[in-house]
Every structure is written in structure tokens, then in C-alpha cells.
Image (tube, rainbow, N blue to C red):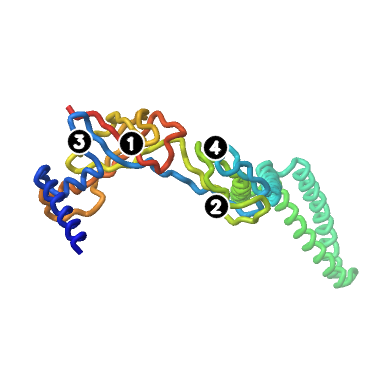
């Protein structure tokens, strides 16, 4: 019991000594964990941003090939995986055939009637005109003879029916000739043209789906995880690889409200790590959050205002493999003039 009492007394004495020798608001001690300023500049503490992307096919099918393993570096546009493309290739060929057929229909309508078709229609009109003249002559003769009884009434009726039939056939032939000369209607051509656009859009969609059977890297990075193996059947948006992006290295840190005036966008910084304390990486301040990370009270005393922090992004211009994602770092800024 006495031992615990002695320990508590020692702790109380230590706390009292700290408060007496270095009097400052308690909130200021918390801000030192985030950053501090001095005559030599500003020191901030943060971590290398973790930037990862889950890569997936925008198509379904069986995985034919996986080209990279975990830990392999990848470059922008590098092929990482391939689906079995045969099904999508057949869809492309079918769409191309439909496009070509519809294009032939449109070309036929735009070209209009062939000269041979027009000449045949004119010949049909001429032949039916002669037939109609002959039927009219027979009808007149029988009409004159039927009153005298020389020609039977039935023969006269047959002549009149033949005349009417020949007149109707001649009228239809003349209309066919007029259509052949005029060619297709404008509405028919527009309909065929619209159908061709639809077939071309279907072909573009089929080609786009076929293109999505190849999975490529969006930017430079390192493969973290390979989720599936060749032969697996996957659905769209099923993650195949998880890649850590390394083309840009960002540092996420926070600046206290009391030091906010000493940090400006674009100012140069040095980034230090525990693994290489003597080697500084060069960078610059790229972004300062316009708002605090938490909603403050309506009224802040000077002590409470020291607890406000703002998120800061630092761009590293000289990164290497030793600067890894999630690594804790120290950011050193030059002293404000």
C-alpha cells in the first residue's frame, strides 16, 4: 500500500514540476503531436498516402490468362489479364454483317431505279396500251352488232369485261413506270439511314465489349493482390488485381491552426523518414484544406483554437522505392520571413 502511495506522489510531483517550469495551455501540448514551429522552420508529422485501385473487367467470362504476379511492377497500359474473347468476337462479326446488309439496302435506295427497270416498265405500258386498244375495238364492233342480233349478248358482255380489265392493267403499269422513274420515297431513305446508324451503334457496342476482355494497368504501380486464377469465371466488376499506385507520392499531414499562417501552397518542403534520417526527400505543399477536420464550437477561446487542425497534402518530387505507402514521415518547412 505504501509503495502505491509513493508512486502516486511521485507522479503528482512530476506533473506539478512540468506545469511550473513550462507553463502553457494544456491544448498546446496536444498540438505538438501534430506540428510545431520554431526559428529554424516548421515541423509537421504525417504519413505517405495509401493510394490503391481495384482492377476488374467490365465484362463477364472465363479468365484465359493472368500475366503478372503479386509484387510485380506495372506500367500504364500494360496488359494484366485476358478473358476468353471468342464469344465477344462472334458478337462483333454478327454486328458487322448486319451493318453491311443495312448499308447495302441504303445504297440501293439512294441509287434509285436502274435504267433497265425503267425500260421494262415502259415496255409493259406499251404492250398493255396495245392490248387495251384492241379490247376497245372489239368492244365497239360487238356493241354495234348486238343491237341487230348478229352477236350474242354474252359475247358483248365478255368484250366489255376484257376492255375494263385491259384498262385497269394499263393504269397499274403506268403507275409502276412512274414509281420507277421517281425512285424510292425520301422517307424510305431516311428510315434506311436511321437503321444503318442503329446497326453501326450496335457494332461499336460489340467492339467495346470485346475490348473490355483485356485488363490493363491505369498507371504505374505495384501489384498488391491477385484475387483469381486462370480458368475462373468472373462477373463484371469482380476484382482481379489490387494495385498500389506509385506514379505520384503524396504525404498526408495536418497543420495546427496556430501554424496555419506559416504554411503556403507551393512552398518547398523536405520529407524525412525514420529509415533514412539523413536523407531528405524534396517536395512542395500542394493543398491546404479550407475547413477544419471537426466541427468547432460556436465560440472558441484562445486555448481551444490551438486544437483546430487542417489537412495538408505534400507532393514529393524525388520519391524512390524506400518511400512506401503508409510510412510515417516528418515534414520540414522553411521558417516564415
Q: Which image quadrant: the N terminus? A: bottom left
Mark pair 2, 1: CA separation: 30 Å
Residue density around tag 2, few if under 14, some if 14–19, many if 20 or more, within 10 Å: some
Between disc 2 and disc 4, whose residue precedes?
4
Residue density around tag 3, few if under 14, some if 14–19, many if 20 or more, within 10 Å: some
Mark pair 3, 1: CA separation: 17 Å
Between disc 3 and disc 2, whose residue precedes?
3
Which is nearer the eye, 305 or 110? 305
Q: Residue at x 31, y 35 (%)?
A: 286
Callout 2 secondary element: strand
Question: Is there CB contact under 8 Å for labels 3 and 1?
Answer: no
Between disc 3 and disc 4, whose residue precedes?
3
Between disc 4 and disc 1, whose residue precedes?
4
The residue wearing badge 1 is: 314
Between disc 2 and disc 1, whose residue precedes?
2
Q: Residue 239 bears which disc, if any?
A: 2
Callout 3 secondary element: strand
The residue wearing badge 4 is: 73
The answer to whether any part of residue 239 appears in the image is: yes
Residue at the outermost front position: 2
Callout 4 secondary element: strand
The answer to whether any part of residue 102 appears in the image is: no
Which is nearer the eye, 29 or 306? 29
The residue wearing badge 3 is: 37
- Nearer mark to the viewer, of 3 and 2: 3
Q: Residue 291 location, x and y as percent?
A: 24, 47
Mark pair 2, 4: CA separation: 18 Å
Q: Residue at x 16, y 53 (%)?
A: 10
Amino acid at each position: 500500500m505504501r509503495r502505491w502511495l509513493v508512486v502516486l506522489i511521485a507522479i503528482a510531483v512530476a506533473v506539478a514540476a512540468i506545469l511550473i517550469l513550462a507553463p502553457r495551455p494544456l491544448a498546446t501540448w496536444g498540438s505538438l503531436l501534430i506540428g510545431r514551429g520554431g526559428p529554424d522552420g516548421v515541423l509537421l508529422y504525417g504519413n505517405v498516402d495509401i493510394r490503391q485501385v481495384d482492377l476488374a473487367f467490365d465484362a463477364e467470362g472465363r479468365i484465359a490468362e493472368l500475366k503478372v504476379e503479386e509484387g510485380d511492377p506495372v506500367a500504364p497500359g500494360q496488359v494484366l489479364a485476358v478473358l476468353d474473347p471468342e464469344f465477344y468476337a462472334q458478337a462483333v462479326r454478327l454486328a458487322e454483317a448486319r451493318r453491311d446488309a443495312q448499308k447495302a439496302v441504303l445504297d440501293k435506295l439512294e441509287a434509285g431505279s436502274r435504267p433497265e427497270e425503267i425500260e421494262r416498265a415502259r415496255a409493259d405500258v406499251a404492250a398493255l396500251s396495245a392490248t387495251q386498244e384492241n379490247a376497245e375495238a372489239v368492244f365497239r364492233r360487238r356493241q354495234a352488232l348486238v343491237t341487230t342480233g348478229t352477236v350474242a349478248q354474252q359475247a358483248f358482255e365478255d368484250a366489255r369485261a376484257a376492255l375494263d380489265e385491259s384498262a385497269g392493267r394499263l393504269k397499274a403499269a403506268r403507275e409502276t413506270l412512274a414509281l420507277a422513274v421517281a425512285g424510292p420515297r425520301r422517307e424510305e431513305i431516311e428510315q434506311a439511314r436511321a437503321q444503318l446508324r442503329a446497326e453501326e451503334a450496335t457494332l461499336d457496342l460489340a467492339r467495346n465489349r470485346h475490348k473490355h476482355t483485356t485488363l490493363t494497368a491505369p498507371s504505374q504501380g505495384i501489384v498488391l493482390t491477385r484475387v483469381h486464377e486462370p480458368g475462373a469465371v468472373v462477373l463484371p466488376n469482380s476484382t482481379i488485381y489490387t494495385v498500389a499506385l506509385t506514379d505520384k507520392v503524396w504525404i498526408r499531414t495536418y497543420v495546427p491552426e496556430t501554424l496555419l499562417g506559416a504554411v503556403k501552397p507551393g512552398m518547398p518542403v523536405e520529407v524525412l523518414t525514420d529509415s533514412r534520417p539523413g536523407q531528405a526527400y524534396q517536395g512542395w505543399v500542394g493543398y491546404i484544406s479550407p475547413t477544419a477536420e471537426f466541427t468547432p464550437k460556436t465560440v472558441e477561446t484562445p486555448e481551444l483554437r490551438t486544437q483546430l487542425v487542417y489537412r495538408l497534402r505534400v507532393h514529393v518530387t524525388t520519391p524512390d522505392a524506400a518511400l512506401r505507402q503508409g510510412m510515417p514521415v516528418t515534414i520540414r518547412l522553411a521558417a516564415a520571413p
